[in-house]
């Protein structure tokens, strides 16, 4: 039986053009017979080179972008909204509200994507929080005299731990604020036109193991999918992510405690419908929820999650699309085998030329795939200023310890060829002369 056009489910996908998951969602939608309408921040003057009739949007111009989406959808209904990333989540919430489809509420998404608002909501709801305070970029030194150490300096809205710096002394704190201020005043950040780029968050550094939590919220009810362990200690001074592995080594009691605290954090933010990705620290006898993002796990990392459905194996993107369409997803269960992903660390600052050793790395036991996303002549920028990984390594099978070991061995087999950058002299910078 041929499915009529009126029967085809239509999902709006809001994403930045650089998002890794966009193509994956497109492949899944085509396979499942779902019509995917893209809204992306591409150049509106181009003659649709992608040939996907996407709606060109600007994340800093929400009113105009929502108007463009609604106008595009005026000749057909939208059954669900999916957002890939934090900034797309805000616009996705606004679009969903305008189109009358289920998604997280706008005010909840705004709070979840602002670290200061998140802390305030947690505190008001009795969810454990570290001490925190906000300061302007040009904060006077005298206002930092009472800050206890160790502490962490954070931007309010950047993701992937970009700009997050630990300080253990007054001199380190001053240096961290200068460094973060320089980042927030950089062209790459200012071009985003974020309203939060003039403020810095200071908060207590919480020692202890860090976890990532993946789940869904449906009609305000949280369903835990998995808890990822992060086997590498994230103690600073910078916090570039590395390895996620599942299943967790936490006891059943510890898992339930984490689940309850994440649920409380979700409720305090007011998130009600869609995927959520939370980050937690276990410290001082408490579960500290660092953040709850109103989106799924970012980038290609979603490939580490594989589900069993009525028809066989299912990728995470299909479950997300089904949930966006308000279909029941209880029949999808996370595969039981151990799985892990490594976000390859940036080897050093410079210009990427090539990577060798891939054949050896791919031959390691339990290694499932290695994807190098870096392109030749791409500039490598380490954390805390950086935000892009050279690639991803995936492993599956055996035990959690087996897959983590396979990631480390595979990464050790890779050799990155990076040309170190030669700093421009002051005079050459002023004259805008390129090397």
Image (cartoon, grey):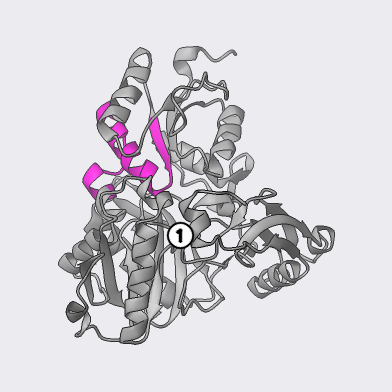
Q: What stretch is highlighted in magenta?
A: 80-109
Q: Is residue 208 visible?
A: yes
**24 to the left or right of 294:** right
Most distant residue in the left direction: 124
Counting from the top left corner in percent of width and height, residue 366 is at 75, 64
Counting from the top left corner in percent of width and height, residue 226 is at 49, 61
Q: Residue at x 50, y 52 (%)?
A: 298
Q: Which quadrant of the view contains residue 120?
A: bottom left
Q: Is residue 191 above or below residue 112?
A: above
> Where does label 1 land, which residue?
160
**107 to the left or right of 12:** left
Q: Is the magenta stretch mostly helix, strand or loop?
A: helix
Q: Nearer the viewer, residue 254 or 317?
A: 317
Q: Which of 179 and 18 is in front in this view?
A: 179
For the N terminus, the quadrant is top right
Q: Which residue is drawn at 31% across and 43% down?
A: 90
Tag 1 secondary structure:
loop
Q: Is residue 291 above or below residue 66?
A: below
**138 to the left or right of 168:** left
Q: Is residue 204 above or below residue 38?
A: below
């Amino acid at each position: 039986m041929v499915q009529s056009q009126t029967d085809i489910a239509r999902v709006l996908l809001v994403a930045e053009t650089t998002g890794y998951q966009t193509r994956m969602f497109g492949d899944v939608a085509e396979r499942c017979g779902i019509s995917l309408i893209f809204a992306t921040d591409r150049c509106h003057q181009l003659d649709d080179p992608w040939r996907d009739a996407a709606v060109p949007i600007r994340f800093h111009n929400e009113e105009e972008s929502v108007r463009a989406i609604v106008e595009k959808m005026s000749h057909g209904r939208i059954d669900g909204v999916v957002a890939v990333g934090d900034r797309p989540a805000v616009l996705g919430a606004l679009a969903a509200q305008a189109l009358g489809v289920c998604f997280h509420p706008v005010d909840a998404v705004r709070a979840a994507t602002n670290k200061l608002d998140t802390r305030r909501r947690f505190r008001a709801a009795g969810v454990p929080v570290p001490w925190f305070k906000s300061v302007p970029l040009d904060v006077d030194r005298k206002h930092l005299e009472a800050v206890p150490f160790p502490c962490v300096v954070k931007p309010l809205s950047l993701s992937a731990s970009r700009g997050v710096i630990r300080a253990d002394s007054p001199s380190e704190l001053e240096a961290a604020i200068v460094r973060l201020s320089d980042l927030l005043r950089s062209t790459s950040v200012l071009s985003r036109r974020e309203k939060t780029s003039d403020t810095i968050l200071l908060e207590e550094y919480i020692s202890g193991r860090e976890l990532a939590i993946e789940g869904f919220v449906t009609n305000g009810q949280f369903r835990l999918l998995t808890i990822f362990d992060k086997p590498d200690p994230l103690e600073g001074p910078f916090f570039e992510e590395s390895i996620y592995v599942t299943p967790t080594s936490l006891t059943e009691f510890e898992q339930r405690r984490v689940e309850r605290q994440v649920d409380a954090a979700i409720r305090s933010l007011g998130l009600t419908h869609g995927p959520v990705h939370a980050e937690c620290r276990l410290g001082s006898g408490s579960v500290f929820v660092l953040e709850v993002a109103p989106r799924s796990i970012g980038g290609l990392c979603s490939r580490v999650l594989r589900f069993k459905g009525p028809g066989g194996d299912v990728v995470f993107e299909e479950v997300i699309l089904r949930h966006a369409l308000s279909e029941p997803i209880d029949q999808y269960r996370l595969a039981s085998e151990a799985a892990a992903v490594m976000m390859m660390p940036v080897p050093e600052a410079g210009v990427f030329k090539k990577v060798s050793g891939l054949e050896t790395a791919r031959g390691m036991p339990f290694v499932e795939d290695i994807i190098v996303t870096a392109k030749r002549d791409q500039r490598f920028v380490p954390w805390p200023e950086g935000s892009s990984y050279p690639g991803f390594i995936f492993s599956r099978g055996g035990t959690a310890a087996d897959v983590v070991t396979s990631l480390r061995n595979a990464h050790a087999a890779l050799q990155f060829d990076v040309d170190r950058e030669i700093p421009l002299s002051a005079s050459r910078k002023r004259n805008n002369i390129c090397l």
